[in-house]
Every structure is written in C-alpha cells, then in structure tokens.
Amino acid sequence: MSKNEEQSDGDNILGEDTIQIIVPGIQRDLQTEVILGFVLNIIIYAFLLIYFSVTFWYLTTRVVPYLFIDEVFHVTQTIRYIKGDWFYWDPKITTPPGLYILGYLNYQIVKMFTSWSTTTLLRLVNLIGGTVILPAVVLRPLFLFNAIGFWPITLISFPLMTTYYYLYYTDVWSTIFIMQSLNVIITLPLGENYSIWLSAFFAGISCLFRQTNIIWCGFIMVLAIERRAMIQKEFNTHNFNNYLKAFIYSVDEFKTVVLPYMINFILFFIYLLWNRSITLGDKSNHSVGIHLVQIFYCIFFITIFSLPLWLSKNFILGYLRRWNVKFIQSIFEIIGIIIIIRYFTKVHPFLLADNRHYTFYLFKKIIGNQRRLIKYGLMSLVYHFSIFTYVELMRTCELTFHPILPLPIKETITLPVQLTHISWTALILCTIVTLVPSPLFEPRYYIIPYYFWRIFVTCNAEPIIGDIQPPPTGLPPITIAATNRLLFEFLWFMLINIMTLIVFIKYEFSWYTEQFPQRIIW
C-alpha cells in the first residue's frame, strides 16, 4: 500500500475500511489506534495541566519571582502600557509590541481575580496560551484531521516551547498565531474563501510578535495555492509541470487565494521602509549576516527531538546503505558540510558571554570545540546524518500523484494532511531564509520550523527494537501500531522537560552585574 493510501485511510479511520494491510500477515487496526490515541490524549492532558500549573506556581513564586534575562525589557515595556504610556518604546527591544498588548489585556482581566504580582500575571499569558489555546484551539482540529500523525499532548510538551510557559517571552504566542494560520488553511472552518482571509489575518497578527513570521506567511500561502491547484489543475508525476500549474493557478485565482496574504507582504514592506531594517530597537547586536551553519544546528535539534520517530535498526541500516551506494557523493557532501562549518559559522558575542543558555555549553564543549577532529570530523558526520533523517522522514510522508489519473479527491477539505514536493521545497526554503540571516545560535528560533515539519510527518508503526516477521500461512495476522512510538515521543519530551527543569531549579550561580541568582534555560 502506498503512503498516500495509508494517509488517506488515516484521515477516514472511522469509515468502513479500518484495517490496513502492510504486507501479507502484518496489519494495522487504524480505528483502534485512533480511539486509543484520543483516550490517552484526554487522560494525559489532565495530568499535564496539573503538572504545568504546579511547576508554574513554584517557579514564578519561589525560584524566579524576579525578572529573568530578557523579561527585564518585555515586562518593563508592558508596565509602561499598563500605566497608559502607549508612546514609550524601549530601544533595546527588537520585536513588535504584540506581546505587550496581549499582556496588557490579560493583566486588566486577571488582576480582578487574584493578587499575584505583575510579573506572574504577565507570565500567565504564555502558560494559558501553551496549555489551553495551543492544544484546544490550534492542535485539536489538526488532530481530528490526522489522528495517527501526531498527539497534541506531545506538541504542547515540546521542550523548546515549554521553557517559555514560565517566562514572559514572545515565542509562545508567535507560534500560536502562525500555527493557527496553518490550521485554518487545512481545516477550512469558514469554507474555501473566507478561511483564506482568516488564515492571512492570523499570519499577519503573528508578525506583531515576531517579524520573521512574514516568511512563514509565504509558506502558508504556497500551501493554500497548492491544496487547491492539485485538484483544479490535476497534478501528476511531472514535478516541473506541477510548479507551472501551481503558478498559473495563483495568477488565475489571485484575488481569492494570493491577495489576502499579499496584503501582509505589502504592510511588511511599508514597515521595512519606515524602520529601515527588519529589526526594531537594538540593531547593532542583531545585524543580518550569512550564517549557513545555523541550518545544521536547527536540523540537528529536530533530529534529537524526533528520535522516537526514526529510531530503529532498519533506519540506521538505511543510512549505512546510502553510504555504500552513494559513497563518492556522501564524501563530497561531508566536504561541503566541513566548508560551511569553516567559513560560515558566526560566533555572536552573546553566545560566548552568556552562560545562562545551553547553547553556551553545547558550543564551547562540542560544536565549537577547538579540536578539529570534533569540530569538523564528528560534527560533519552528525550534521550529515541529521540532514538524512530530516529529509528521509519528509520523503516517506510526501503526497505523490499518478502519472495520468487525477487525484480521486475533489474537495480541498478532504485532502490528507500531507505536503507535496512543492510545499516541502517551500518549507525547506522558508526554514533557510528564516534562520540563515540570524547571527545568534538560539534554539527558540527552531520552534516554528520544528512544528511545521512535525505536523506533516506521520509516525510509522515500525518496531523500535527488532523486526516483526509475518506468521506462517494459516495463522492470524500480526497487528502493529504507531501508538508505542507516539507515546515514546511524549515521554521523550517530558524526560527532557523534567531534566531541564531540575537543572533550572537546582543549579544557580551569580553574575556581578545581576542582583539575583542566574540559572540555565534553552
């Protein structure tokens, strides 16, 4: 059975055909997987709410009741708004005022019900966003469309994201709004036309939290075009022709599909003319450059976090087989990676001066190690495997087409949650354009690239350890499921979360320039 058929079954798992034959003697019971997934998500979500609420209370009232790192700027700016000083702007702030407006609204509402400190009330914005709005509003509809692909409880537990449930940073709501834009374009809650305008609206709002989201607005526009063009223009196996068909469709349907997003691009262009830079405020420490190795950092992080999705003997053997089959090509790829490490690594002063981030230790001990065998030999192989993992997991989830026959699907709403070669290319390009200009090695910049990648990667049912052999003829088939991997993914994230939380609580040190103890976060 092809990947498209597998995904199609996954999207209609409560229909008549819920048993998927992998090979003779091995099958998947998709309906059981979905029901079990729903039950586990509901039960575990209740415990997650308790976990995040208790840890939030403890951290904000006992561990860091004071402003921590960049909160000095974010909280202070919001307090000026709370006091009615709407024309004040801290020149050290580099992002638009979306978070401060949201924080102001939250403060005015919540202060009537509690006597918590202003800092705690403002931090509550991100806790509510990450543990309530993200799973209930953003991820739930996507989960209903692809219940065998991912679990909402897992994505809200993504370690790079959960760090900011406890702090007043822009990342949580920046992610929520751009993800909601993606959600709307896939689930079409207002129908074909109105949903595009709603999607563009959410994408535009997300840019008020982080300017680079304008790039992801472009990706979502490509997705909106593609999901209609593949039906209307009858995509086939001729990839170049599909690009042309998508372009022609975008011209034909400019007013209905492209224009809503184009308004965002025009407004952003006006912003660039006014500000003379993409960065607000502190431009000297956030200058744009060519930091190509940044893409390696991102894919390396994605590979580590997606370990439950790819870890298996067959996957490792697949990577080794690629070396055997494409040895010369692989050698040149390694050489290319080494060249990029050597000439396109930027070491921002903040990276080596701030030991409150894991990147300080990761870069000092491993990535930027002075030993060439580690810096070039080991890391080039690590990046090579990471790229293989990133691309291979994408490749197996790509929506493909028949050489002649059109898709049997006639309505956009019934399309599977999959990307074609066009949107996968757009995703990779948007990730590169977002990350490469940034001189800072910041894992939080990888949150949105990870989410957009993970939503479209469907977890397989291959055993993590060992192989499954079909039973002898005449015996009942063996049933396998992706549930174990999806549960492993959640537990993997929570293990990382608990470990980093312990480090944050237990390990503190002093800075002579800071009044309060300092701690380590992502």
Image (cartoon, grey):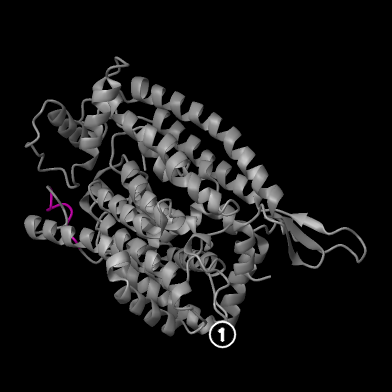
Which quadrant of the structure image shows residue 222?
A: bottom left
Q: Nearer the viewer, residue 264 or 486?
A: 264
- The dominant secondary structure in magenta is loop
Res 366 seen here: no
Q: Residue furthest top?
A: 115
Left or right: 521 in relation to 281: right
Name the residue that disc number 1 marks. Answer: 404
Question: In the depicted view, which residue is nearer to us: 157 or 218?
Answer: 218
Give the residue type that dot 1 points to: Ile
Query: Which one is nearer the viewer's eye here, 499 or 424?
Result: 424
Q: Position of residue 36 (x, y in %)?
A: 67, 43
Count of labels in the image = 1
350 to 20, vertically: above or below = above
> Is residue 86 at least partly visible in the picture?
yes
Above or below: residue 373 compared with residue 361: below
- Let me know if residue 283 is in the magenta part: yes
Q: Which residues are magenta?
A: 282-288
Residue 183 percent across, percent down from the top left: 42, 52
Residue 178 on image: x %, y %: 34, 51
